[in-house]
Amino acid sequence: MTANLKRTMRPTRLRIFCSLFFIVAVVALLGPISCSRAIGQRSGESTSEDGHGNRVDLLRASGPTPSPLPCPGCWNPSTASENFDWLTPPALPPDWLATNALGPPPLWVTSDSGLPPPPADTAPNALFIDDPAVVSDKRLDGWFLDFFEDCCVRLTFRHNFNLEASDVDSNLGFDGGVLEISTDGGNTFEDILSAGGSFVRGGYNRTIATDRGSPIAGRQAWSGNSNGYITTVVNVPTIQKQGRLRWRMASDTSGGNEGWRVDSLYMTWCVGMGTPCPSPTPSPTATPTPTPPPRASCPQYTITEGAGTIVPGSTDTGNHCVWCSTLITLPFPFVLYNQAFNAVNVTSSGRLAFVCDNEPDGYRERCLPASPYNCGYDFTIFALWYEWGTLTYPEGCSTWANGCGIFTSISGTAPNRVFNIEWHVIDRKDSIQTGNFEVRLYENDPNQRFDVVYGHSQKKPFTPPVAGVQGPPEFFTQDFCNVPAPQNSSLIYQLEPCATPTPTPTPTATATPRATPRQRPIPHPRPLPP
């Protein structure tokens, strides 16, 4: 029994050819093109808006245009998204295909109620499949993919699962879900990892038992209880002919659970490959391969999923602007990368700058480590670095009773307090698009902990470029870059110290004429730069 419903997503060879032809024609007619000027004239910043009276360009309302970004990494960055909210449950999108290879109904459907809660990441709908107490193999074939001569494909989605798993072994699952891909038009499928993909975040968490009859026995999978929606980000392998994605849930011979929900799909890729602003005069020397930025081995911050929620801020810091900062005093010294700070610059762009605030720094968002602008980005927490504004425009700011801005509060009592810094922000170019997130700084924490908590955005998907933390040179941890921010989730950052090296054992002398080897010196941890 099948259900064949949903739209396709296909970047075609024709579109690539047209893009190349256009670039060649313009270069031939006009000569060298200024990349900076082209990128500086960004979409959505013409002298007239798109006809929606409630859209406000905060840049024009607040100040001059800052320096533009350099050329992007591809000719035509492209995106596709799906949140299933336009459908009437249980219908799936056209051309999506649900099948049960084994087991009883139901098939994959869209759903707006039921378990596991909540029913959707963005109300009202999400994909859903049950987890029965019998052997089953339930498959949902989704987006068609055709990335001929494209690159850099990344898929982000949110999902909520409660699938049967061991209560004794946290690494063992009984029923589980996997993501698979076809590279031959949907005839055969394999696991996304086996096909050459990789998880950036939210990858498989258990291995399915081999003694209970599961169709995916022995494979890594999502299993157990996610306790609400989590974010998975995956690098999709290169596909040079038509492929397809599949979400697959398999159960074993006994025991079931609530099921699996999938929502908020978002995919980015680059149409065409190569630099967008080539020089018209070819260089006689070979271009060296870019070297990735150096990164010290330790100590570095690690990131784990948390369970915290936003603690509302009650004290207004006075930050109501675009590309600006406000210096505030901390209620206790906070330690970041082994350096103590008594104050911090809170920026409208979603950063906490403990040394230099770098505002105004519009259009300068980039993946970590961020290179210096007015000064270095050392000792900076990038909660959600984006072109936000904290101005008090009514369209988006009416989302909160205290409007837009950056607000603080204190939880707990000394010497174990938590200082909460909450952002109420709107998109600089579209004042009805909102963001809500928070950084929580911990007092006297031995691992120099801070949390980043993401609330709900009013409009999705939106693409904040960067989240993470950056310390002195070679010290940085990036959570994500150029993918949508998670919603209603919490992340814990903790500084992991360098492990104590294991001494090299002294070789045992033997009864031979050779001298006894000297003991090798014991290495010591490298100290953190000041």
Image (cartoon, grey):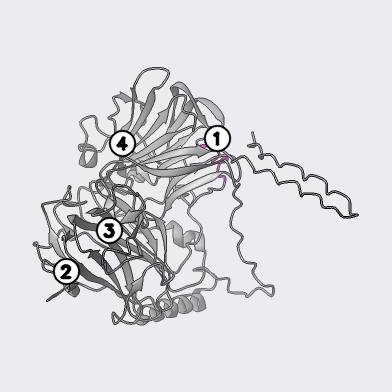
Residue 96: x and y, percent?
19, 72
Q: Observer-nearest residue: 299 or 501?
A: 501
Separation of marks 2 and 4 at Cα, in angstroms: 34 Å
**Residue tagged by mark 3?**
174
Q: Amino acid at mark 3?
A: Phe
Image marks 2 and 4: residues in contact by CB distance under 8 Å: no
Magenta stretch?
Answer: 372-380
**Residue tagged by mark 2?**
93
Q: Residue furthest top?
A: 414
Separation of marks 4 and 1 at Cα, in angstroms: 23 Å
Q: Residue at the location (30% across, 60% down)?
A: 266
Residue 521: x and y, percent?
76, 42
Residue 523 visible here? yes
How many neighbours does mark 1 have within 10 angstroms: few (below 14), some (14-19), or many (20 or more)?
A: many
Q: Which of the marked residues, 3 or 2, is nearer the chain's N terminus? A: 2
Residue 45 visible here? no
Element at badge 4?
A: loop
**Residue tagged by mark 4?**
308
How many neighbours does mark 4 have within 10 angstroms: few (below 14), some (14-19), or many (20 or more)?
A: some
Disc number for residue 337: 1
Q: Amino acid at mark 2?
A: Pro
Separation of marks 2 and 1 at Cα, in angstroms: 48 Å
Element at badge 1?
A: loop
Separation of marks 3 and 4 at Cα, in angstroms: 28 Å
Q: Amino acid at mark 4?
A: Gly
Q: Give the side of residue 164 with respect to residue 70, left or right.
A: left
